[in-house]
Image: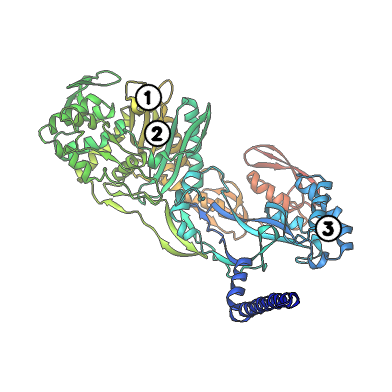
Amino acid sequence: MNIRANILLRVYLAFGLIVLFAVAVLIRLCDVQFVEGHKWRAMADSLSTKYVNVEAARGNIYSNDGSLLATSVPEYELRMDLYAGGIEDRDVFNGKVDSLALRLSQFFQDKTPKEYSRYLRSARRDSVRYLLIKRKVNYQDLKTIRTFPLFNIGKYSGGLIAIQQNKRILPFKSLAARTIGYKNENVANGVGLEGTFGNYINGESGKRLVQRIAGGVWMPVNDEAEIAPKEGADIISTIDINMQDLAQSALEKQLIASDADHGCVILMEVATGEVRAVANFTKVAKGEYKETFNYAIAGNQDPGSTFKVASYMALLEDKKVDTNTLVATGNYKIPGHMIKDSHGSIGVVTVKKAFEESSNAAIAQMVDQHYKDNQAQFTDHLYDWHLNEKLRLQIPGEAQPVVKNPKNKSWNKNMTLPQMAYGYEMQLTPLKMLSFYNAIANNGKYIAPIFVKEIRRLGNPIEQFKARVVNPKICSDETMKKMHALLEGVFTEGTGKSLASPFFRIAGKTGTAQVADGNKGYKAKKQYQSSFCGYFPADHPKYSLIVVINDPKGTYYAALVAGPPFREIADRIYASDMQMYNEVSDRLVGNTKSPEAKSGQTKDVKRVYNAFGIKALYAAKSDYFNSVDTSNGIVYEEYSAVKGAMPNVNGMGLKDALYLIGNAGLKAQVKGSGKVVSQSIPAGSKIGKGLSVQIELK
């Protein structure tokens, strides 16, 4: 073969291979396009679009009195489409972008107008369709921003994109914050009510289609979610916001005064078990306390002398002693330890007196001697009362109670029983201790506390909760009657005598306990826990209350440390709760003259005098009237305001007088206090708007 033929052969061969390769490529393209096209198009769509969850607005949490404790408010992430329909024209954008930059700079104060202008123009050059403007913008600010240049062209034409998110807020800030709790990514099940009732509060998430754009940013395809989220249900808690405020204020004040490490207060309604207030504070700096740990339900410690109620109840129930049995106080020696009364011996006294004076030696001696041969008999009572079990609360974090029995390896047959008698060698939370006192106040019915009483959706109840009965009757009626007398005696004759109220009776027990300093034990550094637990009014108990102050500096006796906040809370609740007052009609017995009558608003005056049982002759149907004292009682004379005439405000209180004067278009100048005794413009005189009238009160 000559050279020319050899070259042509090689060319034809190479050309043939190229043609075959081209045909193979064409076949593969057709296969991808037509045979496998559906598969690859679906994959492309999955890479450029996807569905994401749209968080639902969480349900509200309300207090017992209807106040809003926690709610979700809309919060927005602002983005901008630099090529939206209304600003796609370059002249429109350039003509107003500097004005927009100025307004954004003035509003957010995070960049200069020039920086904003460069930021927007640069994004425009890069054809950005989803530029971040600002995160965490509230609704009121969004309304203002929508009036800015470019943005005010139209909801969609101006390029502003507002992505709604939900922000959880507590309207009352720190009030009951730990009980309300929170939900975040770092805590699996959340904290407090927010965590426990998350299945109700969270609602159901929606779905939104988003598309991937340049820079790996996902932009919503539509303004509205494809599947709308479903709002969460509302929680009606048992917390009373006013009582919560009172509890936190009283606790914080005492913690600062005592320079204590931490403390808690729990207020509970006796009959229902509904918790009205829970306050927990920990010292974070000198004179500064915050809620960082829920001591009320998780703070397991030796309860100290407040536990003596259980010891005395066991002794009385087993008829080992009676309230008039004599017992020695002062010191009681057990192997390896001397149990002492901190105030010294008060001699041989009755069991009732020993309880009132909180004698450690007396109760240790009685329990040790009467149960020494059958120690399980004593601990069986504690187990029958379920003191060793959790209360199964509606919020998480409850500590496991520790109550020993003779089968435990740590049980010492010589030391454990007498020390348990006055509240050592066990671990109980403040709420556990309060629940037992609440059972005594509730005539033996032991119920578990509750924090939520109802769940509502769209205003309609979908689930209601009642307190679980732990033990329907913790002791006999005879024993219960004696326990009531013992607890009241603490305030009339014992350690709580200085805290007794002249207006209502209180029953309870002081508790001063030495607590261990971590692993160093009791002797490393003497730390004390002062507690006060009881209920009021003692004759018709409505509320049970415990105050615990841990590691107070200086004096540590419970009556001086935990007692003042207990008394303050009880006093103010009693003063504000008319249902706890005795009937007032008998307070007029012996009076020959009716109390002074005041003119004013009809419904208010009638309510007051009806409460006192005073005879009243109602001849008036108007909103306001004057009253006249007569020998037959009080006559209410109808008062009718005449337009353009001076109203008669004589005999009225300042509130009613100012209301009528203001409605008449006059300006009032006030002197004195009490009720109106004179007015500078006589009643019935013609008046003009804006005139000044002087009223004197005495």
Residue 370 picture quarter: top left
- Residue nearest the viewer, comparing 642 with 493: 493
Asked if residue 178 lies left or right of residue 86, the reply is left
Give how far across and how far down residue 192 sits, in percent.
45, 48
For the residues bearing labels 2 and 1, Cβ distance under 8 angstroms = no
Q: At x 69% / y 57%, what residue is drawn? A: 215
Mark 3 is surrounded, within 10 Å at the Cα level, by few (under 14), some (14 to 19) or many (20 or more) other residues, namely many
Query: Which residue is the site of mark 1?
Result: 527
Mark 1 is surrounded, within 10 Å at the Cα level, by few (under 14), some (14 to 19) or many (20 or more) other residues, namely some
Alpha carbon separation for disc pair 1 and 3: 66 Å
Query: Which of the two discs, 2 and 1, labels the residue nearer the N terminus?
Result: 1
Give how far across and how far down residue 385 sits, in percent.
24, 45
**Looking at the image, is mark 2 or mark 3 nearer the viewer?**
3
Q: Spot the residue most to the left.
A: 373
Query: Which residue is the site of mark 3?
Result: 149
Which amino acid, by three-letter code, is at mark 2? Val
Give how far across and how far down residue 68 sits, in percent.
55, 52
Q: Disc 1 on helix, strand or loop?
A: strand
Which amino acid, by three-letter code, is at mark 1? Gln
Quadrant of the image containing the N terminus: bottom right
Q: Label for residue 548?
A: 2
Alpha carbon separation for disc pair 2 and 3: 60 Å
Which amino acid, by three-letter code, is at mark 3? Pro
Where 388 sits versus 617, above or below?
above
Query: Which of the two discs, 2 and 3, labels the residue nearer the N terminus?
Result: 3
Q: Disc 3 on helix, strand or loop?
A: loop
- The answer to whether residue 406 is visible is yes
